[in-house]
């Protein structure tokens, strides 16, 4: 752990980012890692955003560290059959507004309910509800899933290397693959699955293990080491940083978008 190093020895790192990194290492245990924790730390980090070039690399390496914790959280959820929680981080938008062509005020979509269930009062016939939704409403995705949102911000920043971004994408795909793999077993809960694993042959156990996420904090800590090096030597070369040919876009410039929603 490098908490003391961040708070005591980083002369070129802004104190706020030094303290922020120290807080990540202090509180980033699996028991603390939830969507709410990641989202709150993201809001906190966005408040520290700096447009000054000398702080850009430190800021985006810090951002990547938070993303690593989000990946760890989602992977842990997937490995333990918490598919809804993993899906919230990976595919389920945090906020969708339903706009009405009649001009009525928009309403928030219930995150874990289908639109046909939320608006079933419109008609007792499901097909009629689907038709009404298509003809009379327009969904707007206001807040994308955290992993998707953060990945897009990192890609747009121009600071992070293509190699790191590819590593990120592979692990996001891995989470989706693990959810599909474990869901195909049709077990009622985690305990039933692990009971099955306990009595499986060694080769079958190895096969199952190879199809889980099993993410760790290796990259998270490596990013931390690079931050410490950059704080001492601004010319330090990090494998996580690109060549900065792409202009940085502020997090505050992210735009809302409308997409179709499954009924």
Image: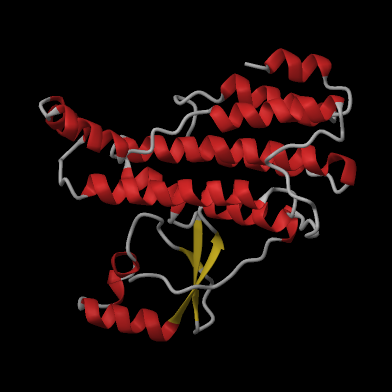
Residue at screen point 50% across, 23% down: 29
Please state, as top left, top right, bottom left or bottom right, where the C terminus lies in the image.
bottom left
- In the image, residue 131 lies at what x, y percent? 32, 84
Residue at screen point 31% across, 37% down: 210
| Figure check: 73 above or below 165 | above
| Figure check: 157 above or below 61 | below
- In the image, residue 175 lies at what x, y percent? 39, 46
| Figure check: 100 above or below 168 | below
Q: Determine the image quadrant of residue 77.
A: top left
Left or right of residue 172, residue 251 in this image: right
Residue at screen point 43% across, 56% down: 92
Left or right of residue 142, residue 155 in this image: right
- In the image, residue 145 lies at what x, y percent? 50, 53
Nearest the camera: 133 or 157?
Answer: 157
Left or right of residue 250, residue 107 in this image: left
Left or right of residue 24, residue 82 in this image: left
Residue 48 showing in the rendered view: no
Nearest the camera: 243 or 106?
Answer: 243
């Amino acid at each position: 752990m490098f908490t003391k190093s961040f708070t005591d020895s980083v002369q070129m790192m802004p104190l706020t980012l030094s303290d922020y990194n120290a807080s990540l290492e202090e509180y980033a245990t699996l028991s603390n890692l939830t969507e709410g924790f990641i989202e709150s730390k993201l809001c906190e980090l966005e408040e520290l955003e700096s447009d000054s070039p000398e702080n850009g690399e430190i800021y985006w390496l810090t951002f990547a560290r938070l993303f690593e914790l989000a990946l760890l959280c989602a992977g842990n959820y997937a490995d333990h059959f918490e598919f809804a929680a993993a899906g919230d981080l990976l595919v389920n938008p945090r906020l969708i507004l339903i706009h009405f062509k009649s001009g009525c005020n928009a309403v928030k979509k219930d995150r874990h309910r289908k639109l046909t269930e939320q608006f079933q009062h419109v008609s007792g016939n499901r097909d009629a509800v689907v038709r009404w939704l298509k003809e009379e409403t327009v969904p707007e995705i206001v807040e994308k899933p955290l992993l998707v949102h953060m990945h897009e911000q990192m890609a747009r920043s121009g600071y992070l290397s293509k190699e790191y971004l590819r590593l990120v994408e592979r692990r996001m795909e891995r989470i989706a693959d693990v959810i599909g793999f474990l869901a195909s077993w049709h077990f009622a809960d985690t305990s039933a699955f692990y009971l099955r694993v306990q009595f499986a042959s060694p080769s079958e156990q190895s096969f199952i293990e190879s199809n889980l996420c099993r993410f760790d904090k290796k990259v998270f800590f490596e990013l931390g080491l690079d931050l410490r090096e950059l704080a001492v030597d601004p010319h330090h070369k990090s494998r996580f940083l690109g060549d900065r040919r792409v202009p940085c876009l502020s997090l505050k410039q992210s735009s809302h978008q409308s997409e179709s929603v499954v009924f």
